[in-house]
Image (cartoon, rainbow, N blue to C red):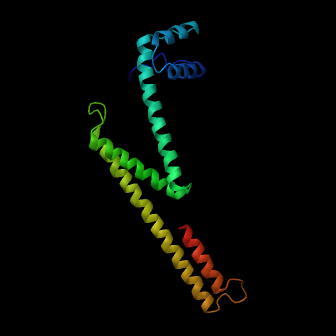
Amino acid sequence: MPPRSNVAKLPDNIRDELQRRLHESGYGDYQEHADWLKEQGYEVSKSALHVYGARFEKKMEAWSFVNGMIQKATEDSGGDVNALGDVLLTMLQGELLEQVMALKVEPETVDLQSLVQMVVMLNKEKREQENFKEDFRKRVAARFAELEKETQDNGLAGRTLDPTTLKRVREEIYGML
C-alpha cells in the first residue's frame, strides 16, 4: 500500500479550505495553492496538489451528477418516496447503458466487466422492488377480501366497519399502491 499523500495528512480545516480554493480556481493555480499551504506551515509539492486536485475534481463532478439525478428523479416522481427509488434506478440504468453504448468510458481507467455487473445488479434490484410491490398488493387484497367476507357474514357485528366504509377504504388504499 502506498504511503498517504501529504494532502491526506493535512488537518481537516486546512484540507477543507484547500478544497474550496481548488474549486474557486477551477482546479488550477497549483503553485499558488502550494505557496498558501507553505504559509500555513505545510510542505506539499505542486505535483502532489495536481494529483489531489484532479481526483477531487472528478469526485465533485460525480457528486454534482448524482445530485442532478436525485433532483430530476424527485421532480419526476412528484415527491413520492417509493416512486423516487424506481425513477433513480431507471435513470442510473439508462446512464450506465448510455456510457457503455457510446463508449464514453476510457477502457484503461474503467473496468467494463464491473460496469456490466452493475447494470445487471440494478436490473435485479428493480425486479426485486417490483416483486415486493406485487407481493404487498396481493397481501393487501387478500386482507381486504377477508374483511369483506367478515362484513358479509356479520363477522364484524358490533364493530363500526360496514361494507360501504370498507369499500371506500379499499379504493383509497389502492389509489396509493
Percent across and percent down for residue 45 are: 45, 10
Q: Residue furthest bottom?
A: 153
Pick the residue in front: 134 or 155.
134
Quadrant of residue 154 within the rendered picture: bottom right
Q: How many marks?
A: 0
Does residue 114 appear left or right of residue 47 in this picture? left
Pick the residue in front: 3 or 48.
48
| Residue at x-position 55% and y-position 10% | 36
Quarter placement of the N terminus = top left
Quadrant of residue 149 within the rendered picture: bottom right
Pick the residue in front: 24 or 47.
24
| Residue at x-position 64% and y-position 85% | 164
Percent across and percent down for residue 13 are: 60, 21
Percent across and percent down for residue 23 are: 51, 23
| Residue at x-position 38% and y-position 51% | 122
Percent across and percent down for residue 145 are: 54, 82
Pick the residue in front: 121 or 3.
121
| Residue at x-position 57% and y-position 76% | 171
